[in-house]
Amino acid sequence: MRPNSLAALMASLVMGAATQAAAADLHLYTARHYDTDNALYEGFTKLTGHKVKLVEDTAEKLIERIKAEGVNSPCDVFVTVDAGRLQAAEDQGIFQPVKSAVLEEKIPAALRDPAGQWYGFSKRARVIVYNKDKVKPADLSTYEDLADPKWKGRILMRSSTNIYNLSLTGSILAANGPEKTEAWAKAFAANFARPPRGGDTDQIKGAAAGEGDIAISNTYYLARIVNSSKPEDKAIAEKVGVFFPNQKDRGTHVNISGAGVCKNSPNREASVKFLEYLASPAAQKIFALGNFEYPTVQGAEVHPILVGWGDFKSDALNAKTFAKNSAEALKLMDRAGWR
C-alpha cells in the first residue's frame, strides 16, 4: 500500500471513530427537573450504550436556545411537562415527525400528536383536593359546578397564566365552546377564597389550613405530600381528600409529560430509540414509582398511593386540542377576571 493511501485510510478510520463517538452521546434538553429521572437516563445508557448529556432549564428558555442554535443545535430530544409546552415547541418548528410502530401501539392516540411530532410518556390528572372537615365527596361533581355560588369564597387556585390551568380551561373550551367557558371562568373566579398565588402545593396546603375549602391540583403534588415522612406533611395529608371531576360525562382532565425528536437532531436513530425506551415497562415504572405520575402505557405499574385513590375515567380529548386552545383560553380567563 502506498504511503499516501495508508495515510488516507488512517484518516478515514480516525474520522469514522470520531463520528461514532459523537453519535454515542444523546443530547437531551429537558424541562423536567426531577432527580428520579436520572434512573431513566442510566437505564437507557445501560440498554443501548448511548450516554445522555443533559441541558436543563425552563421549557421557554430551552425552546429559545434551540431556535438560536438553528441547524447547528446539538439537541436530539426535547422533554417537557404539559401538552401546552409541547405544542409551543411544535409551533416554533422545534420538532421533526417520528413514525414508530412501537410508539403508535403503546401510546394512546389522545396522548400524542397525530403527526408524530411529540408523544406523552406520563400522565397527571387535574383533580379537586378538598378539606374533609368542610366538604363531602357528595358535594362535588364537575369542574363546571365550581362556578356555582355555593362555592363563593371557598376555592383556592393558582394564576390564569399557569400552563396547567391554561390546558384545563382549553379542555373545557373544547367541551363547552367559548361563550359558556367564559361565563364559567367569570363565575369560577368570583368564587376564589383569595387572589391566585403560588403553585399547586400551596393550594393543597391552603385547603388543609382552612384558607379555602377546595383546591385544584395535579395528582403528583398531593402524592408527594402523602408520601412525605415530615409530620407537617402527614397532617396535611390527613386533612384532605381527592375527587375526580366529571366522571358522569367526559371524564377528568389529564395532561402529560412528553418529548419529541428535535428537527436538527444529529442522532435521529438514537433519539427515536430513546422515545421508544420511554414507553418500555422499565421506564414507565420509573415515571410511576419515582415521581407519582400515571403511566401512559396500558398495564404499566401504578404507584400504590395513586392506586389507593381508585380508578377514574379520563377525558378522551386529544392533548393537542386543549394545548392549541391555550391562547384563546388565556384571553377569556383574563376577561373573566381570573388573574
Image: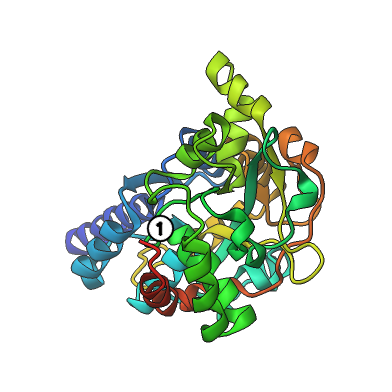
Percent x, y of residue 5 = 23, 64
**Which residue is labeled 1 in the image?**
162
Identify which residue, 77 or 204, lies in the foreground.
204
Seen in the picture, residue 182 relative to 27 is either above or below; the reply is below
- Residue drawn at 60 percent across, 54 percent down: 151
Specify the quadrant that holds the C terminus.
bottom left
Q: Is residue 102 left or right of residue 324?
A: right
Horizontal arrangement in the rendering, residue 48 relative to residue 332 (left or right): right
Task: Name the residue at 74% across, 71% down.
Answer: 250
Residues packed near mark 1 inside 10 Å, few (<14), some (14 to 19) or many (20 plus): few
Residue at x 40%, y 64% (from the top left corner) = 338
Q: Quadrant of residue 107?
A: bottom right
Q: What amino acid is at disc 1?
A: Asn
**x, y (%) of residue 302?**
74, 42
In the rendered image, the vertical position of residue 170 relative to residue 115, given as above or below = above
Which element type, helix, strand or loop, lies under badge 1? loop
Residue 245 coordinates in the image, percent (x, y)? 71, 58
| Left/right of residue 138 with respect to residue 205 in the rendered view | right
Q: Considering depth in this image, is 3 or 168 the residue closer to the camera?
A: 168
Total marks placed: 1
Quarter holding residue 254: bottom right
**The image quarter in which residue 3 lies:** bottom left
**Is residue 225 in sight in this rendering?**
yes
Quadrant of the image containing the N terminus: bottom left
